[in-house]
Amino acid sequence: PASAGFIAIACGWHHSVALRNDGTVVTWGSKRRGQRKDLPTSAGFVAIACGGSHSVALHDGGTVLTWGDTSKGQRDDAPTGVVAIACGRDHSVGLRDDGTVVTWGGNSVGQRNAAP
């Protein structure tokens, strides 16, 4: 319902994430690999993204919170100074406030190589 105040949604293989207009994040679905998480109740998230079995949330201060599967480094080295996020099956991408691109997670077919 509209009264729930959701402004963004994302789906992985077996989990879903939603962002509320108050900046809080809700997760549901499988928790086999940690896809479902009790996130901090504090507001301040501005974007969400899902990979196959991991998720990413961007805080308004430019920090990134990741959770879920770690088998391919999906939660390693989450960057700071980020203004936009996206996820592939086993990797994530962040656009930094200085215009550079940073990647983390899987690299089985070059997902992390030669970021512009």
Image (cartoon, grey):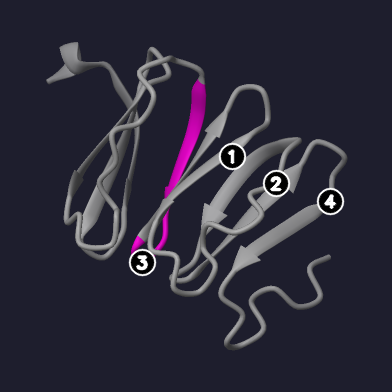
Q: Amino acid at mark 4?
A: Thr
In this rendering, would 71 be left or right of 116? Answer: left
Q: Main secondary structure of the magenta part?
A: strand
- Location of residue 97 with respect to 71 vertically, above or below: above
Distance between the Cα atoms at labels 1 and 2? 6 Å
Secondary element at image label 4: loop
Q: Amino acid at mark 1?
A: Val
Q: Position of residue 12 (x, y in %)?
A: 31, 59
Distance between the Cα atoms at labels 3 and 2? 20 Å
Residue at horizontal 76 percent and vertical 35 percent from the top: 81
**CB-based contact (under 8 Å), mark 1 and mark 2:** yes
**CB-based contact (under 8 Å), mark 3 and mark 1:** no
- Could you say which disc has been placed on residue 52 in the image? 3
Q: How many tags in the picture?
A: 4
Residue furthest to the left in view is: 1
Residues drawn in magenta = 45-53
- Location of residue 38 with respect to 103 vertically, above or below: above
> Of 80 and 83, which appears nearest the observer?
80
Residue furthest to the right in view is: 98
- Closer to the chain start, of discs 1 and 2, is 1
Q: Position of residue 87 (x, y in %)?
A: 50, 59
Q: Residues within 10 Å of mark 2 (few under 14, many from 20)?
A: some
- Closer to the chain start, of discs 3 and 4, is 3
Does 10 lie within the magenta span? Answer: no
Q: Which residue is mark 4?
A: 100
Residue at horizontal 38 percent and vertical 12 percent from the top: 22
- Closer to the chain start, of discs 3 and 1, is 3
Q: Which residue is mark 2?
A: 79
Residue at horizontal 61 percent and vertical 22 percent from the top: 60
- Could you say which disc has been placed on residue 64 in the image? 1
Secondary element at image label 2: loop
